[in-house]
Image: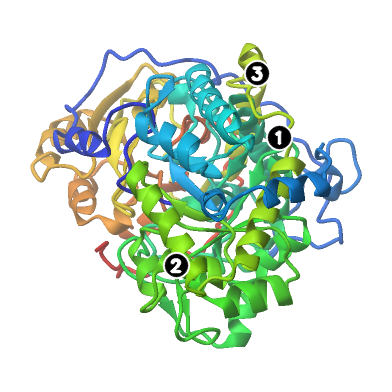
Amino acid sequence: MDSGTSRLVLSGIPAVALLALLASNLASACGGREVETSGFDAAPGMLDSGAGLADGGGLPDGGTADAGPADGGTIADWKKPSFCPVDTGRVEIILSAMPLERKAAQVLMVGAEGNGRTPNDDAARSVSELGVGGVFLPPITGVQMEPADTAEFITSLQGLAIGAHGVPLFVSLDQEGGHAAALNSLNGGTDTPGSMALGQARAPRFTFDCFDIMGEELRAIGFNMDFAPVLDITPDHKNGAMNTRAFSGDPVLVSFLAPTAVWALQNHNVLGTIKHFPGIGLTGVDSHKDLPANDMPLAEFHATTLAPFREAVEAGAEAIMTGHILYSAVDPDFGASMSKALLRDILRGELGYEGLIVTDSITMAGAKLGAGDEEPTARALAAGNDIVLLVSSAHDDARARVDLIVAAVSEGRLAEADLDAAVRRILSLKMKYCVFDQPLPDTASLGAHVGLDENFRRARAAAERSIVTYKSDGDVLPLRDDRKILFVGPGTVYQDAGSGWANMVDRSMGEVLERFSQTVTRFEVGLPPAPDKAQEYLPLVEAADVVVAATINAHYSVEQRDFFAPLFAAGKPVILLTLGVPYDAWHFPGADVILNVTGQRSVSMIAAAKVLFGNIDATGEPAVDMTPDLEPEPRE
């Protein structure tokens, strides 16, 4: 799910407030902020076994499958869930006691916000009065409550649901890793590399470790459903909204890493939800604003975009989020999330999938356009979805969707038997993933599961394996303490040029470099940078021996490219760190060194600094096609 303009969950701070901060462009040469020093010690040893997938498959393009199981065996041995038994008789009793309106509410998942640890009136009414089946905590990154507070918030919601109707909630969020992670070091969680960085690492152990960390922390806090991992393939650099959220543009590599991510979440009884079926990465159109369309032939569809989903289903994935995209060769009339041909014929029929199907947000433009002339809520359920995701937290919106579902059944547009089947799957998986048996987080044990030093080290090891050297000329590296280093780049608050979302991190790349050398001077700006900011850093360039520049999705930002251009005319060695999409490298051929870091979280920036100062080598490999194409489509 991608909520885009949703409010910051539980913080009371709207996303527009962060955008206002961005507009002020952080003062240059920011200083004086104390930065946590944990994690700057030597990297632990890598776990190497040379194991491949259980069937012996290897990585594409010469990649290696090291960092496999430390105790030997196959990767499939990592799948060790402790599911709870499913009492089918109890499921039928609960289902038979539900009136039509309650069943309509059970297939609805709504946004939930609150005031401190207490759900607001809208959330409380949707849960207790309507009996919605699940809640979603919006994913704008950063500025959220601490884990203990979030756990209390979830406890309150579950108490309302169980007290009113006896059925606990699915509690979900977007926790993909990297910049797309609602739980991170800003609010007590563990930073992990994002999916594309894991694709660059090309080792399933690191993918497993990062999703294992996320699963442990999420379940401890009270989440039982995660809208991750992303299985879209992104061979086209024009998809700014997707940017680094996908593992790779290669369906073989995505298929190779996908099962370990799913298993890692399942091992903690977190229902990993693979998305966005059957793939939205092969387009430059944002489904929040329009309906993307793809006219690839059916054979190509099966061999590329569908392949990772097929692999994950065979590996045991039990929840899938549908994307709002039209594949004309499969269904020329309806978007994927509204298509019986895709959901019933291909997903359930051809792939043999028996788990939950969840829509991406039903209020996105792609959902409305993909439904044709039909109302999208009822159409989505009739097409084969089990859960309709409504990001809005307004009770009136939830009430209206329940009424639409009831009306669709009454008018024969939605078979009540199909509604029953959806509720049956929901109840069964709530039992299997121990939502009935263990609905509440154990707040007393949060410290044993969230923000652990060991988990930070595991995430950092993955990040250290992910750094890619795109270019390295001359003897600029390693950096030395006897050279004056100027850092020019973003601070801790910025706007993502690819997606348009506001974002925050706990430290800047410049702050990380300062921990490695006392000769670092920082010139930091908000993104997008103001037009006149470049003139302010030029005097600092003259005084420096070497410049480290960091970009975040400059490929989609003329403002960033213009801001950095004067660096390359100053005659000083320049090191470029691409903290977002690696395609930024195409725009700055004058850089002496270019490292594709592909991450803005602390673990990725620390790994980049270690490469710069010669502590480790850059051993990652590109996860996408890096053949230069300098014509990105602007974000609409």
Asked which quadrant contains residue 67, the reply is top right
> Which residue occupies the foreground of this view, 302 or 584?
302
Earlier in the chain: of badge 3 and badge 2, it is: 2
The quadrant in which residue 374 appears is bottom left
Horizontal side, residue 580 vs residue 558: left or right: right
The answer to whether marks 3 and 2 mark residues whose Cβ atoms lie closer than 8 Å is no
- Left or right of residue 432: residue 37: left
Mark 3 vs 1, N-terminal side: 1
The number of numbered discs placed on residues in the rendered structure image is: 3
Dot 1 falls on a residue whose secondary structure is loop
Query: Which residue is denoted by mark 1 in the rendering?
Result: 436
Q: Amino acid at mark 1?
A: Phe
Say which of 496 and 392 sits in front: 392
Q: Which residue is mark 2?
A: 324
Q: Is residue 285 visible?
A: no
Q: Label 3, on which residue?
A: 442
Whether 448 is drawn above or below 354: the answer is above
Q: Secondary structure at mark 3?
A: loop
In terms of image quadrants, where is residue 480? top left
Marks 3/1: CA distance? 15 Å
Q: Position of residue 140 (x, y in %)?
A: 38, 39
